[in-house]
Amino acid sequence: MKTSSLFIASMMAISFLIGLSCNTAIAEGDEANIFKELLENDKVVVTESRRHPGTIVPMHTHGPYVAYIFEACKVKFTFPDGKSVVKEIPAGKVIWSNGCRHEVEVIGNTDFHVLLVSLK
């Protein structure tokens, strides 16, 4: 029981961190896109981000993080070298990354809703 509570708290923190580590903001003119910092301490930053179809989050950098995807979505990631990849991510997917630099474009018909826990 303690382990699952800790996992849930960790995932919420991760979501917050993902958004914070990206230094992104709410897309101008669209208050329905959300970016909330849920927790920050000396170990992690946890962020929640919801981006609507058509939203582009400019090039940004992440340190190591864990992400939890709330709902199935289709996203295009573009990297500094100009290469890009389209990913269809299922709801409930948990992702680990050592860190990266990318632009994110929501290209599907559903929101890109993520909880990001970024490590400091």
Image (cartoon, helix red, strand yellow):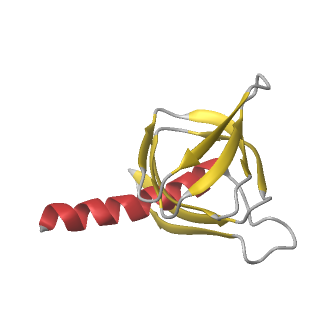
Residue 56 placement (x, y as % from top left): 79, 53
Residue 64 seen = yes
11 and 63: which one is in front?
11
Residue 39 placement (x, y as % from top left): 45, 66
Residue 45 placement (x, y as % from top left): 47, 56
Residue 120 seen = no
Query: What residue is rendered at 31% in x and 65% in y?
Result: 8
Residue 103 placement (x, y as % from top left): 73, 42
Direction from residue 18 to residue 91 in the image, left or right: left
Quadrant in which the N terminus appears: bottom left
Direction from residue 37 to residue 77 in the image, left or right: right
Query: What residue is rendered at 81% in x and 73% in y?
Result: 30
Q: Residue furthest bottom?
A: 31
Query: What residue is rendered at 75% in x and 27% in y?
Result: 80
Q: Residue furthest left?
A: 1
Query: What residue is rendered at 54% in x and 52% in y?
Result: 18
Direction from residue 22 to residue 37 in the image, left or right: left
Quadrant in which the C terminus appears: top left
Q: Residue furthest top?
A: 81
Q: Residue furthest right?
A: 29
Instruction: Using the image, determine if residue 100 lies above or below residue 50.
Output: above
How many discs appear? Answer: 0
